[in-house]
Image: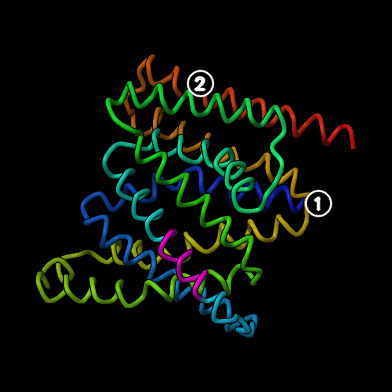
Amino acid sequence: MNSGYIYALTAFGVWGIIPIYWALFKHIDPIEVLCHRVLWSFVFYTLIVSTKKLKNHTTVNQKLLLGFAGLLIGVNWGVYIWAVNNGHVAESSLGYFINPLINFILGVLLFHEHLSQPKKIAIAFALAGVLYLTWVYQGLPWIALSLALTFGIYGAIKKRVQVPSILGMQLETLILIPLTLGYLVHIGIQNPQSYLERDLLTWLLLISCGVVTGLPLIWFSSAAKRIPISTLGFFQYVAPTLQFLCAILYFKEDFSVEKAIGFSLVWLGLGIVISEAATLRKKY
């Protein structure tokens, strides 16, 4: 179990400080960075699948669902990379704070799960926070909402399609490979200098996108096998907390009192959920 805690902290810790990594590509078009992330992630997953000798026994329906999941995670990755390199790390972290609450709503709509009274109150606080931030931003906090929704629906699909994580991710990135290669070839033809003038370190960092994306997933899977899922749930708040701290302390993003009020409403909702989970765990 102790190793499970280490795996969980390492996975969520890396996801928490990953904005610093994506900020290294500020001088590159975010769509190109996304394409490299998809391409090298697919290579990484394929190597792992080959090493483990996993057999692909997915049905046509499962492949279609995983294809849709791939499109969702592609949008999620693209929005996140763009947000980091355009000064919206704090709002991105908000998306992952909202995500567990989105999961509750999707659980009711898609899996007919029951919402407890504390969870209803938590969702109400989160909704109030989003509405307040809509007023502060003079528009919907679309980065936070798109990250929360795409990742929430992605998670719901993964719950329905029971395949090994690495195999699922390989198939999800495979669906994006034609678009990815097409875009990278297009850039090479239109502006070959952009590739030729790039230094070795930048190329190594781009190729490393696959490892940076894939390794935390492996650590997360290892943690899930070793510690209770309820305990693992608490660790999911490590990543957005670290992302938020990166936004304020490392990227020096503006965080006004008005924004703090909106975030606090969401955090209050999360506090209710965590308190309920802790109470239930102690009870049983």
Q: Secondary structure at mark 1?
A: loop
Report the magenta residues as a range: 64-73
Mark 2 and mark 1 lie on one chain; the one further toward the N terminus is 1
- The answer to if 226 sits in the magenta stretch is no
Residue type, numbered disc 2: Ser
> Residues at badges 2 and 1 in contact (C-beta under 8 Å)?
no
> Could you classify mark 1 by the number of other residues whose Cα lies within 10 Å: few (under 14), some (14-19), or many (20 or more)?
few
Local packing at callout 2 (Cα closer than 10 Å; few below 14, some 14-19, many 20+) is some
> Which residue was labeled with disc 2?
264
Q: Position of residue 16 (x, y in %)?
A: 50, 43
Q: Which residue is mark 1?
A: 1
Q: Residue at x 30, y 60 (%)?
A: 33
Say which of 29 and 126 sits in front.
126
Q: Nearer the viewer, residue 197 or 73?
A: 73
Dot in front, 2 or 1: 2
Q: Main secondary structure of the magenta part?
A: helix
Q: CA distance from mark 2 to mark 1?
A: 33 Å
Instruction: Tell me the element at label 2.
Output: helix
* Apparent side of residue 256 relative to residue 12 in the rendered image (left or right): left
Q: Is residue 217 above or below residue 112?
A: below
- Pick the residue in front: 198 or 112: 112
Query: For residue 68: magenta?
Result: yes
Q: Give the residue at the far top of this rendering.
A: 257
Above-or-below relation of 284 to 164: above
In the displayed structure image, the side of residue 283 where residue 69 appears, left or right: left
What residue sits 29% from the left and 30% below the top? 139
Percent x, y of residue 200: 27, 66
Residue 159 x/y as whole percent: 63, 60
Amino acid type, mark 1: Met
